Amino acid sequence: MLIEARNLTHRIADRQILDLPLLQVAAGDHHLLLGPSGSGKTTLINILAGLLTPTTGDVLIDGASMARISPTARDALRREKIGLVFQTLRLISSLTVRQNLALAQRLGPGPVHRELIDRLISQVGLAHRADARPRELSQGETQRAAIARALCTQPPILIADEPTSALDDVNAQAMVDLMLSAARTTGATLIIATHDRRIRGRFPQAIELKPTALAA
């Protein structure tokens, strides 16, 4: 398994945010983590990416235990293997679309690959907006730029948190099309966490997360 999580729980004070006995994701799989607000989706995404330490349990990424490696090694593993599309997108406001991708590559495992940057920008339909800054983009354009940024280091794992939550039906399906196409093209494993049941039918494998008894 490329990703394996066992006996994951996460608590904040007396609140249990997450309780997940098992998650297994093979290389190249496309998985949906589906659940309402309070079910621990973002918490799980952050744990899988090594941004958050669970209260109990462990995550193995390509055989490496996230609980046992050092914080430095965990950061390096995330840079090399995981592309993240955050719910808040987090593009650098002072940089253009092209510069945001170049910065991601500069901070990643390899050199800046300008041809790949331009190809990804074109694939997400932003060739005409490559020199625009985030404030000049629509919500949909910003999301597409964030996906291109996540892909520009060619990670084997692509993880997106609520990528369709602010989109209408047509644009939500277009966003899923884009992520599935990008994952198939690069061979990446895709995990999407969402409460958006409009896209449930697009994923053969879905895990339903439910609010825990003590969840906020």
Image (cartoon, rainbow, N blue to C red):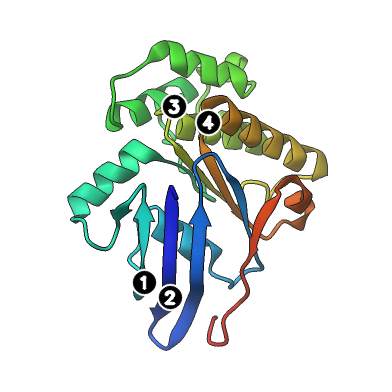
Looking at this view, name the residue that lies furthest to the front.
1
Q: Position of residue 74 (x, y in %)?
A: 26, 51
Q: Distance between the residues labelled 1 and 3?
A: 31 Å
Q: Tell me the quarter of the image containing the C terminus.
A: bottom right
At label 4, counting other C-alpha atoms closer than 10 Å, the crowd grade (few under 14, some 14-19, many 20 or more) is some
The residue at which mark 4 appears reads as: 187
Query: For the residue marked with disc 4, what is the amino acid?
Result: Gly
Mark nearer the viewer, 4 or 3: 4
Give the residue displayed 60% in from the left and 30% down from the top. Answer: 184
Q: Distance between the residues labelled 1 and 2?
A: 7 Å
Q: What element carries label 1?
A: strand
Q: Can you say whether 15 is above or below 65 in the image?
A: below
Quick one: 155 or 4, which is closer to the camera?
4
Q: Is mark 4 on a helix, strand or loop?
A: loop
The residue at which mark 2 appears reads as: 9
Give the residue displayed 50% in from the left and 67% down from the top. Answer: 22
Query: For the residue marked with disc 1, what is the amino acid?
Result: Gly
Give the residue displayed 36% in from the left and 47% down from the top. Answer: 62
The label on residue 57 is 1
Looking at this view, name the residue that lies furthest to the top.
115
Q: Position of residue 132 (x, y in %)?
A: 53, 22
Q: Can you say whether 179 is above or below 102 in the image?
A: below
Mark nearer the viewer, 1 or 3: 1
Query: For the residue marked with disc 3, what is the amino acid?
Result: Cys
Q: What element carries label 3?
A: loop
The residue at which mark 3 appears reads as: 152
Mark nearer the viewer, 1 or 2: 1
